[in-house]
Image (tube, helix red, strand yellow):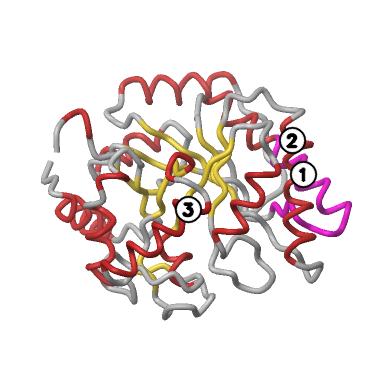
Amino acid sequence: MTNKTRLRLGTHVSIAGGLYKAFSRGEKVDCTAIQVFTKNANRWQTKPLRQNEIDAFKDARQKSSIDWVAAHDSYLINLASPEAEKRLRSIEAFIVEVERCAALGIEFLVMHPGAHMGNGIDNGLNLLAESFRSIVKEVSGEVTVLLENTAGQGTCLGDRFEHLATVLDKIPEGKFGVCLDTCHAFAAGYDLSNAEGYRTTMDEFDRLIGFEKLQLIHANDSKKPLGSQVDRHQHIGKGEIGPEGFAAMMQDSRLQRVPKIIELPPGDNNCFDLENLGMLRKMAGDQG
């Protein structure tokens, strides 16, 4: 793999002790891309970023070999909620997430499309798009929002590529793309466990959404079987997807430019991170 197609590969890293520490943690396992939370993902409230936190993060990034960063939003946010009060709170919280990314210079924010809570898929997708239209009016436009596909658990939206395509069609005003999670796709019924299934799945993605919208891949194996609709991540090659599907993904020349992030337990002294990332690099033919 040449320098022009440098493999952007990494993991979701902790921000414990300070946002800026994400870079040194990523560098320990040779990341060239990382994902972070910019705040506690299980709380609504957060203290505003201080200027010294922003400066430390930007300085660490400038000095780091890691050149691609995304953030993930709070798990509490549901922009598709049929309850007006909860949806408004989610909109306000998501605006804060976008503003934090903009302040830190993080270009991408990953989010789950939310749940319709029994209100129906079409209604949920319409409310999600409506929420995004409200958000776009309030933010600067520096940050690209990435809709992540889901496993389809409960009333969660986004398990079908059609859902993501529908929402993207309804929000042409803002900067939006897609994050494809392999575990979620497999649990939702897209068979990524072999080369043929991988090709079929990605052809479907390209037809409905387009590779130009694919800005990030969450590379996670699945503990649960195909179509289970249960989101349980497993180490690369050790789950129901297995090594063949990941090898097909890592060798897909159309996706060389797309960063790939694992969301798996790091293990003692990062042993699992090193093993998982090493396996993906080997599949890509990059031993560096």
- Label 1 to label 3: alpha-carbon separation: 26 Å
Task: Determine which of the numbered discs, if any, sits on residue 110 in the image.
Answer: none
Q: Amino acid at mark 1?
A: Ser
Quadrant (top left/top right/bottom left/bottom right) for the N terminus: top left
Give the residue at x 65% y 52%.
166
Report the amino acid beneath label 2: Ile
Question: Is 175 in the magenta?
Answer: no
Instruction: Mark 2 and mark 3 in contact? Answer it, CB < 8 Å.
Output: no
Tag count in the figure? 3
The numbered dot on residue 131 is 1
Residue under label 2: 135
Most foreground residue, 63 or 126: 126
Front residue (pair 237, 173): 173
When asked about the image quadrant of residue 94, the answer is: top right
Quick one: SS at disc 1? helix
| 119 versus 95 height, above or below | below
Q: Quadrant of residue 174?
A: top right
Amino acid type at circle 3 is Arg
- The image shows residue 264 at horizontal and vertical percentages of 37, 60
Label annotation for residue 207: 3
Local crowd size for mark 3, using a 10 Å CA cut-off: few (<14), some (14–19), many (≥20): few
Instruction: Identify which residue is drawn at 59% across, 51% down.
Output: 165
Within 10 Å of disc 2 (Cα), the crowding (few <14, some 14-19, many 20+) is: some
Residue placed most toward the observer, 66 or 113: 113
**Secondary structure of the residue carrying numbered label 3:** helix
Give the residues in magenta: 77-95
